[in-house]
Amino acid sequence: MSRLETTRAELGLVVVYLNKAEARDKICRAIQYGSKFLSDGQAGTAQNVDKSTSLARKVFRLFKFVNDLHALISPVPKGTPLPLALLGKSKNALLSTFLFLDQIVWLSRTGIYKDKEGAELVGRISLFCYLGSSVCTSLVEIGELARLSTSIKKLEKEIGNKDKHYNEQYRARLEKSSERSLALIKAGMDVVVAFGLLQLAPKKVTPRVTGAFGFASSLISCYQLLPSHPKSKTV
């Protein structure tokens, strides 16, 4: 493959990536929390970028609550333990509520919804929903990692002395475990972000700490949304 064809293929992946509304939202989120980290809650250019990007992101999330509402009423995968199923549905319900209430906050900031005190209350309730959904996500990922660990150990016993890294099923489970671990790290960071936005521990979780965790969490989200390269076939 020539350098031009390689460049064209790479640019094609970038186009596919940027065409995703979710990807653009996460890039904006990285800008938002990066600005929050730089401003540390102080007035100035960085704080203006933080506020304007936050408002812009709310437009990306209009009607996004439908996604988690659909997941809420969809059946859980077969074999999922009841506690994990309940946690997963709780996450969907809380995240859907957060995204729905966030639209009211957007209406207030644009001047359409005039009740400022009501909008502030709704905004705080929505952030508690976000905190709850992040906690549920963390617990789900811990549970799924435990299940994966058990299945990997069972598979190792079945494979025996053979080179397990040549076993496709083993490699797939290891890859899934890595994905779950990364999702757990991200969910834990989002819990800290929610604490910061709610100012539940203002002395420890400062705007700078909130910005740092939010920025790192956003980078993980951007990575998770990257299009996968087609795997080359071996003969």
Image (cartoon, grey):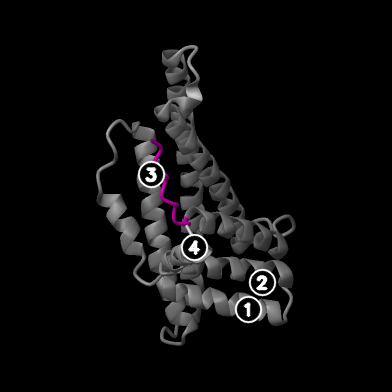
State the CA–CA distance, disc 3 to disc 2.
32 Å
Identify the residue under disc 1.
49
Dot 3: few (<14), some (14–19), or many (≥20) neighbours within 10 Å?
many
Q: Is mark 3 on a helix, strand or loop?
A: helix
State the CA–CA distance, disc 4 to disc 2.
29 Å
Q: Give the range drawn in magenta.
A: 225-235
Of label 4 and label 3, which has the lower sequence position? 4
Identify the residue under disc 3.
88
Which amino acid type is shown beneath numbered disc 1?
Val
Residue 10: assigned label: 4
Looking at the rendered image, the quarter that the C terminus falls into is top left
Q: Does the residue at mark 3 contact the one at mark 1 (Cβ under 8 Å)? A: no
Q: Is mark 2 on a helix, strand or loop?
A: helix
Main secondary structure found in the magenta portion: loop
Q: In this view, does 104 lie above or below 30?
A: below
Of label 3 and label 1, which has the lower sequence position? 1
Q: Is residue 115 above or below residue 161?
A: below
Q: Does the residue at mark 2 contact the one at mark 1 (Cβ under 8 Å)? A: yes
Which amino acid type is shown beneath numbered disc 3?
Gly
Q: Is mark 4 on a helix, strand or loop?
A: helix
Of residues 163 and 113, the one nearer the viewer is 163
State the CA–CA distance, disc 2 to disc 1.
6 Å
Q: Does the residue at mark 4 contact the one at mark 2 (Cβ under 8 Å)? A: no
Identify the residue under disc 2.
35
Dot 4: few (<14), some (14–19), or many (≥20) neighbours within 10 Å?
few
> What residue lies at 62% left-to-right and 61% top-to-bottom?
215
